[in-house]
Amino acid sequence: MSEKNKKIIIAICLSVTTVFMGVSFFAWTLVPHLQMSEYLKNIQNASKEHRASVLLSTFNTNAFMFEPETYVQGYVREVFLNEMFIQYRSGAFANSALLPLLDIALQKNIEYAIHHPDFYEYDFNIAKAYDAKYSLNPNKEYLSESEKYYKHALEIIPNRQEVIYGYSTSLLNQGRNQEAIDLLNKAIVTNPYIPQNHYQLGQALYFTGYEKYNDSLDQFEFSLNSEVDMVSELTKQAYLKFFVYFYKQNDIKRFTETVQRLISIDPEQKASYQTIVDYIQKNHTMPLVNIEN
């Protein structure tokens, strides 16, 4: 082959490579980024009460936003589903017309997870979406599906806290309390100094019933003494149950612990709780308390 022909072939190869890279950049990088920018702009410009309807309109008219399945498109899907969680927590799904949005977001994330099985975040979000569907419509099949994705996420990253907490809640919703307790105990063995692990275990023990109240109080106290983030209403309700239980058990030590904690988590009744604590410290005996339940 002559030197001239070699140069021609090299030039053709370089031209083809340049065209291919240009097309690839446009199709797999520039277009997805432009799509995502348009998507985010639509969401950000919408008022809070109209964000869900804007989402639905956007995805009905721009199905191309999910193709091709690049990393950016995965991010779009994740943001879409997270927006559904925001809408869910705000109570927006009381409007049944918005329910299809959750199914769309869920399906789009499932599609992406199938092609990207090593990203635990998608499994975790999918599991949470099924949990949300269960809370809106208590069909046990939703919990079975959420469990499948929680398990897969834990196979990818075994000690991820938020996945463990989500899975334990799913198990509790299925009435599999001991499995939830075992899962959280394992998390504590692995990371004994993480207060949130103890708080989650305290919840699981509390939901199991009064026979676990002693253990539940231990776990709650460990976590709250470490200033862990807590679900305030749930914690308050748990301690009100402890208040009644330990009073009826005539357990002055545990009753006192409970009342001292209620001073901070039930501030509306702070004065009453403080009076009880003062009485116990002065008389070293249980006060007379009107227990209605």
Image (cartoon, rainbow, N blue to C red):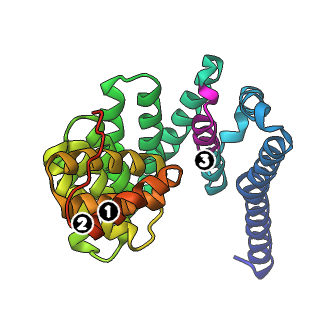
| Viewer-nearest of discs 1 and 3 | 1
From which residue to which does the magenta span run? 80-93
Q: Nearer the viewer, residue 209 or 13?
A: 209
Left or right: 139 as drawn, with respect to 288? right
Left or right: 215 as drawn, with respect to 219? left
11 w.r.t. 106: above or below: below
Residue matched to label 2: 283
Q: Is residue 157 visible?
A: no
Residue matched to label 3: 69
Give SS at disc 3: loop
Q: Residue at x 75, y 62 (%)?
A: 16
Q: Label 2 sits on what residue type?
A: Asn
Instruction: Measure the C-alpha gap from mark 1 to mark 3.
Output: 67 Å
Q: Label 3 sits on what residue type?
A: Glu
| Viewer-nearest of discs 2 and 3 | 2
Q: Is residue 271 visible?
A: yes
Crowding around mark 1 (Cα neighbors within 10 Å: few <14, some 14 to 19, many 20+) is some
Instruction: Measure the C-alpha gap from mark 2 to mark 3.
Output: 70 Å
